[in-house]
């Protein structure tokens, strides 16, 4: 990525499919899901300011803010976190991405560099689904979109910005943690990697 970036990590959802547990605090391979996401951002962009929208925690080190009211959804959370961004680009991520690597962020930045008219770049899975909470955005167009958007859907906000797509393979295992089965799979995959 040629331009400096900051990051907004959304970590305040209800985790209803996980029984309402503190999903960002769940551990995989010896650290919380949130710690993994923040450390991936820092490995990719060491000077990035990281804003976590969700309950404050001792770890990872980041700037914590809450949307008002808490739990209002991803668009209000993004709006709250984005208000603290200063860099010309923002990495937008969910807190539940145990498979996220710096290489994903490099690919997103390169896609944005290669698409000067695009407002952003997002990962797209094998089924063609945009992963709206795994993307890199130019702050100007995103600020303009946020200033006029009154809906609640990330697709409704980000889809019209026509981001560049970065294909990635989940190898049939998923990419985020939405269910207990996803968590078990991530632990099996990644804790096995750590022991090798």
Image (cartoon, rainbow, N blue to C red):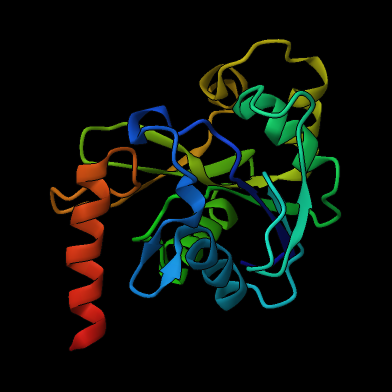
Q: Residue at x 79, y 26 (%)?
A: 68
Residue 85's x, y, as percent? 82, 50
Residue 50's x, y, as percent? 72, 60
Q: Quadrant for residue 82, please give it.
A: top right
Q: Quadrant for residue 54, please give it.
A: top right
Total labels drawn: 0
Asked if residue 166 lies left or right of residue 37, the reply is left
Vertical position of residue 160 compared to residue 176: above or below: above
Q: In terms of depth relative to the viewer, which is nearer, 142 or 71?
A: 71
Pick the quarter of the image with the C terminus.
bottom left
Residue 144's x, y, as percent? 80, 27
Asked if residue 164 lies left or right of residue 52, the reply is left
Observer able to see residue 101: yes
Farthest residue toward the left? Answer: 172
Vertical position of residue 30 compared to residue 70: above or below: below
Vertical position of residue 84 compared to residue 159: above or below: below
Q: In terms of depth relative to the viewer, which is nearer, 48 or 34?
A: 34
Farthest residue toward the top? Answer: 150
Asked if residue 137 lies left or right of residue 187, the reply is right
Observer able to see residue 169: no
Q: Residue at x 76, y 32 (%)?
A: 67
Asked if residue 126 lies left or right of residue 135, the reply is left
Pick the quarter of the image with the N terminus.
bottom right
Q: Residue at x 53, y 54 (%)?
A: 114
Vertical position of residue 129 compared to residue 36: above or below: above
Residue 160's x, y, as percent? 58, 20
């Amino acid at each position: 990525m040629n331009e400096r970036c900051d990051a907004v990590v959304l970590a305040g959802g209800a985790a209803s499919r996980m029984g309402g547990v503190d999903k960002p605090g769940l551990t995989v391979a010896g650290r919380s899901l949130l710690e993994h996401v923040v450390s991936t951002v820092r490995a990719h962009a060491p000077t990035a300011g990281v804003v976590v929208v969700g309950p404050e925690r001792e770890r990872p080190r980041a700037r914590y803010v809450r949307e008002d009211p808490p739990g209002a959804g991803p668009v209000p959370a993004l709006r709250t976190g984005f208000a603290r961004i200063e860099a010309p680009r923002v990495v937008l991520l969910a807190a539940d991405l145990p498979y996220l690597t710096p290489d994903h962020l490099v690919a997103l930045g390169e896609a944005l560099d290669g698409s000067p008219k695009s407002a952003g770049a997002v990962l797209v899975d094998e089924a063609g689904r945009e992963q709206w909470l795994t993307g890199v955005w130019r702050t100007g167009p995103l600020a303009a979109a946020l200033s006029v958007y009154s809906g609640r859907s990330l697709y409704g906000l980000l889809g019209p910005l026509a981001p560049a797509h970065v294909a990635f393979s989940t190898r049939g295992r998923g990419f985020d943690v939405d269910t207990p089965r996803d968590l078990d799979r991530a632990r099996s995959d990644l804790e096995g990697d750590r022991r090798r």
